[in-house]
Image (cartoon, grey):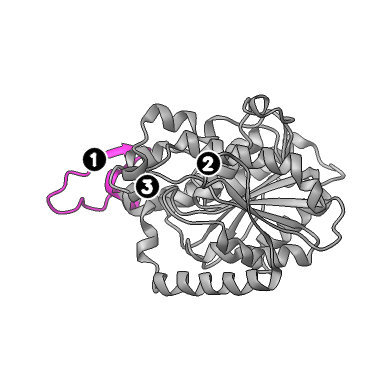
């Protein structure tokens, strides 16, 4: 099932209050009722043998949350798929010949790549944030969607950032903000328009990209509050309290986040003060109790904050499938991104 919601008719023929009610019932109450029914069934599952598995957060147990965070382990042929993706990215990078490993900060890990068309002049820019559970991953695979973006006259900037356990979550978020500041001040040298910056992330990268919408950090970097003009967040976690309670998950073992830190660093609790278009996507086959509900909840919160939001469920997609969804030119995510960048 694919759907967009809270995308209002431009001519506003109908009264906005009526539309609010209709959309809320159609795209929030009904989908969540179905999902919560499934969640109740999951709750009834017996705990693992020899393990007291108490409910710890929003009706979910430690084991349920941990299994949802570590769901990537259940993807068939994952090692082969990752290897294939790396080889594909290397081939694309060789063809595109990007500007590589520019420093956006003082630390060795703070590097970025720029994929820009020749003779570009003031074209839009998408800053891409990789996933990997805040403990793994790199900017290299973003060569694959960069090829599609270049074909549509969009500059792609992919970044590396510090990873746990060497870095705490607050430091990781700060790295991304330094990258945004660097792009804003320097991208005009590569044909980009600093007034048309968009941010795109998947998995942990979706969380980090969403942190760019938080208020109150811009002054520290001497940036306008509306420096980011649009968000694309795919398969993300927006309430890090779930991670704190998934105490056996690989990411939490490395990050060792406290509840106080999770509240501070959760986009769900720090919404933008200025309205911004946002695309929130998840895969149909991703864990229900995590990615489906996280996406629905964050989309609703953004809408309540005045943002124009599209919530997209990609049919048949697991967590890994979402990595290359931006390259699916026939898919709803690609069409929504092109509409956002070109017309908003």
Q: Marks 2 and 1: in contact by CB < 8 Å?
A: no
Q: How far, Cα to Cα, is label 3 from label 1?
A: 20 Å
Could you tell me residue 254's position as x and y percent? 34, 44
Mark 3 or mark 2, whichever is nearer to me: 2
Q: Is residue 219 above or below residue 337?
A: above
Could you tell me residue 149's position as x and y percent? 73, 62
Residue corresponding to mark 3: 251
Residue corresponding to mark 2: 107
Q: Residues within 10 Å of mark 3 (few under 14, many from 20)?
A: many
Q: Is residue 214 above or below residue 72?
A: above
Left or right, 142 with respect to 61, comes to: right
How many numbered tags mark residues here? 3
Question: Which mark sits nearer the N-terminus, 3 or 2?
Answer: 2
Residue corresponding to mark 1: 54
Would residue 50 be seen by someone viewing this image from the given angle? Answer: yes
Q: Which residues are magenta?
A: 41-63
Question: SS of the residue at dot 3?
Answer: helix
Q: Is residue 95 above or below residue 306?
A: below
């Amino acid at each position: 099932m694919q759907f967009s919601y809270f995308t209002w008719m431009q001519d506003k023929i109908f009264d906005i209050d009526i539309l609010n009610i209709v959309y809320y019932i159609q795209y929030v109450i009904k989908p969540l009722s179905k999902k919560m029914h499934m969640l109740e069934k999951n709750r009834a599952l017996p705990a693992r043998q020899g393990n007291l598995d108490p409910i710890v957060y929003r009706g979910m147990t430690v084991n349920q949350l941990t299994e949802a965070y570590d769901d990537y382990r259940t993807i068939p042929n994952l090692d082969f798929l990752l290897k294939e993706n790396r080889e594909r990215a290397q081939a694309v990078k060789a063809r595109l010949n990007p500007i590589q490993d520019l420093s956006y900060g003082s630390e060795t890990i703070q590097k970025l790549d720029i994929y820009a068309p020749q003779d570009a002049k003031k074209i839009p820019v998408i800053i891409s944030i990789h996933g990997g559970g805040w403990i793994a991953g790199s900017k290299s695979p973003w060569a694959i969607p960069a090829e599609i973006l270049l074909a549509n006259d969009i500059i792609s900037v992919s970044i590396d950032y510090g990873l746990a356990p060497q870095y705490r979550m607050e430091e990781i978020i700060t790295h991304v903000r330094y990258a945004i500041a660097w792009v804003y001040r320097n991208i005009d040298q590569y044909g980009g328009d600093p007034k048309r910056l968009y941010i795109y992330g998947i998995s942990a990268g979706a969380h980090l990209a969403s942190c760019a919408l938080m208020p109150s950090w811009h002054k520290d970097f001497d940036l306008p509050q509306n420096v980011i003009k649009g968000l694309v967040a795919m398969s993300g976690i927006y309430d890090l309290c779930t991670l704190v309670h998934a105490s056996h998950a690989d990411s939490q073992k490395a990050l060792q986040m406290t509840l106080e830190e999770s509240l501070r660093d959760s986009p769900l609790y720090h919404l933008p003060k200025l309205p911004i278009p946002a695309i929130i996507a998840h895969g149909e086959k991703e864990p229900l109790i995590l990615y489906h509900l996280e996406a629905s909840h964050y989309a609703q919160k953004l809408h309540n904050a005045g943002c124009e939001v599209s919530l997209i469920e990609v049919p048949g997609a697991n967590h890994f499938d979402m990595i290359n969804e931006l390259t699916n030119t026939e898919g709803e995510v690609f069409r929504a991104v092109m509409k956002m960048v070109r017309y908003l």
